[in-house]
Image: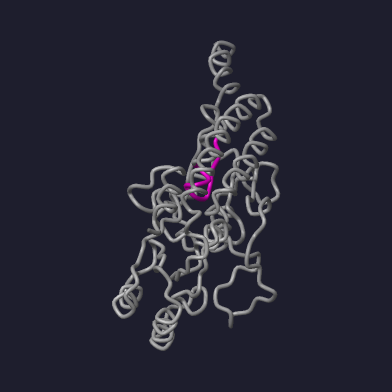
Amino acid sequence: MKKYIFTLLLPLTLFANLSVAVSYPYIGALTKVIGGDKVDTVVLAKGNWDPHFVVPKPSLITKIRDADALIMNGGQLEIGWLPPLIDRGANPKIAINAKTFLDLSQHVELLQKPLSVDRSGGDVHPDGNPHFHLDPNNILVLAGVIKEFLISIDSSNSAVYEKNYTEFSGMWNEKLGLWKVKMAQKRGVKIVQYHDVMAYFNHAYGLTSIATIEPLPGIPPSSKHTIELIELIKKENPCCILHDVYHSTKTAEFISEKSGIKVISMPHDIGALESIEDLVSLFDYLTSAIK
């Protein structure tokens, strides 16, 4: 009887999918497309949440407790919420130094790395701006990194991961060409942001961010700063305010009313708006937002 039960369970053990927990939806999308039917992807945060401030709820601990691997954005974007989850999950497979742990920020060049960090500069990320996935060119880099990661921990399915990456990269390169053409006329356009979420998108397409509604990262705008910003807008004539979906638009709407420039919602991840269902629709939206 014991031998019979073992025989029944053996195929499940041999052919069980790899369970990979990821911090954000965009990582989940890449992991799913590269992993295909060999990987079960568990996404911890939702796309319409502020990625800096995710509440480490017990339900998230349950999600990572049985994961075979963990992929995070890094750049200290998850610093306030993922380390507590890792500690409470007590799963050695997702420990920071484990072979089955991947920090994507270690594989791209980060912009805006500060020369020094102290509280007078606001909530500054010491490693640089962590929103690197919003350069669509980096998406292809990250897809390759995830492919190599999956192969390193599941070599038996390397052919599947290679095939899926090749198909994705072919499609993505076509999209990059289309988005480049679409954004060519926008190079040099001035914009204002609430928080500098779009730094990598701006860098990719030559948009010039002249100011943020936040006087410093993570610091709410004061009346004085808001008035100064309105005067700057009247002087510099930016096209619009590119606003993330998770901060209040109250100040932006006031600035819009006083200066005449429009406010445009800019989703930062899949699910940030209802219409953003995948990575292609995310960048289709972003590259169409500035008229």
Q: Quadrant of residue 15?
A: top right
Residue at the left extreme of this rendering: 257
Q: How is the image coloured?
A: one colour
Residue situated furthest front in the rendering: 185
Q: Which of 258 and 157 is in front in this view?
A: 258
x, y percent for residue 84: 55, 58
Q: Quadrant of the N terminus?
A: top right
Which quadrant of the view contains residue 150? top right
Q: What percent of the width, then of the height, locates residue 200?
A: 56, 59
Q: Nearer the viewer, residue 189 or 51?
A: 189
Q: Which residue is drawn at 58% across and 50% down?
A: 72
Residue sitting at x 31%, y 80%:
258
Residue 209 within the segment the image draws in magenta? no
User: Is there any visible trace of residue 170 in the rendered image?
Assistant: yes
Q: Relative to 98, is 259 above or below?
A: below
Q: Is residue 27 magenta?
A: yes
Q: As displayed, is residue 202 above or below residue 234?
A: above
Instruction: Please give the range of residues in magenta.
Output: 19-28
